[in-house]
Image: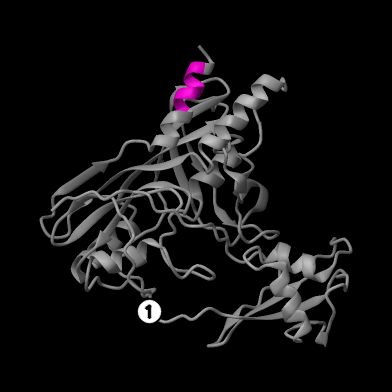
């Protein structure tokens, strides 16, 4: 059965923990524990502001309350909110956790483009988080799946039906398993990199080569754990970074920006976003990877106003998971699905096409 529901649900953003080089994250039933080691080059700044900057999902008021209650220490001593952190300080933080337990079903709109007894394809809207995580236990794709489908199999992380994920502010296709057999079969295809996945991305500028491959390892930034960085072997040698390969093709050269098709050979976190930044062509309005600034064009006020208007039209990275191809777990037939660019993406693309005419 195929059915479509209104796709009007929106979730707020969260980010994973941003910590210094030494990280000690433990969990128990009552608290989230964080251990921050202040960078040697860190300037003097109030501890409440420092912690808020590093744990972006925690409010400054909550940090101040935790300091007053003695749940935050510096070098194993209680501190005050106006204490100014110093290089090499060890900061220990304990914060109450939201109630955990099983994710709860929620009546959230989904756009389902295909469904059979074994699997379904969801066209995820930008703004929807895929699975529950710290500070965001509700309103996710998993919550919606639990409402609309019963007895979904759980993956190794206990997440029902999920074989892969895409970022919160990336739109597009996700395949969801409805049976244990489908989960194993699809997961194996992702593991073997035999899944066909293409994305479309609006990026700043245009690569010199109209087609190419980025074969550069990716790993978490040592300065900001929210960000993935390229670690080219010729510069870093052997690193903990993971092999990552992205094939790209220029679909439209719009001078200041270009529309690319990106085909994933591997599936690392933020792979396309990090690889495009490495190429010098960040994804348009990708705040995490410097794409939310004017990187091509003039400094004239009219052009600046035009770009800022485009940013407002698509208040997220311009990245869409356009196609998925895989072998069906039961019929063993190759299946291929595509989705059109969402409205915000199409509007901005059209605006740039008119601008260069």
Give the residues in magenta.
Answer: 349-354
Judge left or right: residue 284 versus residue 85: left
Q: Where is residue 105 in the image (x, y as percent from the top left)?
A: 32, 71
Judge left or right: residue 176 versus residue 43: left
Q: Which residue is drawn at 55% across and 20% down?
A: 255
Residue sitting farthest toward the left = 331
134 is higher (above) or lower (below) than 108: below
Judge left or right: residue 287 versus residue 80: left
Q: Where is residue 164 in the image (x, y as percent from the top left)?
A: 36, 59
Q: Residue at x 34, y 60 (%)?
A: 108
Q: Position of residue 222 (x, y in %)?
A: 68, 60
272 is higher (above) or lower (below) than 87: above
Q: Which residue is at the front of the view, 16 or 275?
A: 16
Color scheme of the displayed model: one colour
Q: Which residue is drawn at 51% across and 51% down?
A: 270
247 is higher (above) or lower (below) than 357: below
- Residue 220 image-quadrant placement: bottom right
135 is within the stretch colored magenta: no
Which is the main secondary structure of the residues drawn in magenta? helix
């Amino acid at each position: 059965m195929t059915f479509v529901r209104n796709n009007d649900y929106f979730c707020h953003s969260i980010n994973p923990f941003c910590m210094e080089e030494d990280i000690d994250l433990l969990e128990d039933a009552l608290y989230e524990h964080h251990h921050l080691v202040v960078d040697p080059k860190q300037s003097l700044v109030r501890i409440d502001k420092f912690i808020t900057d590093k744990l972006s999902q925690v409010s400054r008021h909550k940090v101040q309350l935790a300091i007053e209650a003695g749940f935050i220490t510096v070098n194993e001593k209680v501190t005050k909110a106006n204490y100014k952190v110093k290089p090499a300080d060890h900061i220990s933080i304990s914060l109450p956790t939201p109630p955990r337990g099983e994710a709860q079903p929620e009546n959230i709109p989904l756009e389902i483009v295909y469904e059979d007894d074994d699997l379904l394809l969801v066209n995820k809207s930008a703004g929807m988080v895929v699975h529950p995580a710290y500070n965001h236990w509700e309103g996710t794709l998993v919550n919606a799946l639990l409402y609309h489908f019963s007895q979904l199999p759980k993956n190794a992380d206990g997440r029902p039906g999920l074989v892969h994920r895409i970022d919160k502010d990336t739109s597009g296709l996700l395949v969801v398993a409805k049976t244990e057999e489908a989960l194993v079969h699809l997961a194996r295809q992702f593991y073997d990199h035999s899944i066909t996945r293409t994305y479309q991305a609006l990026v700043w500028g245009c690569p010199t080569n109209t087609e190419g491959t980025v074969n550069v390892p990716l790993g978490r930034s040592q300065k900001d754990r929210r960000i993935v960085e390229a670690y080219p072997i010729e510069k870093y040698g052997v690193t903990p970074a993971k092999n990552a390969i992205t094939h790209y093709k220029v679909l439209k050269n719009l001078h200041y920006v270009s529309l690319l098709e990106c085909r994933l050979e591997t599936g690392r976190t933020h792979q396309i976003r990090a690889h495009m930044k490495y190429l010098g062509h960040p994804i348009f309005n990708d705040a995490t990877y410097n794409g939310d600034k004017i990187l091509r064009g003039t400094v004239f006020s009219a052009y600046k106003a035009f770009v800022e208007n485009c940013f407002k039209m698509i208040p997220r990275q311009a990245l869409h998971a356009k196609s998925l191809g895989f072998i069906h777990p039961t019929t063993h037939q190759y299946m291929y699905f595509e989705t059109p660019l969402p409205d915000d993406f199409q509007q901005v693309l059209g605006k740039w096409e008119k601008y260069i005419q």
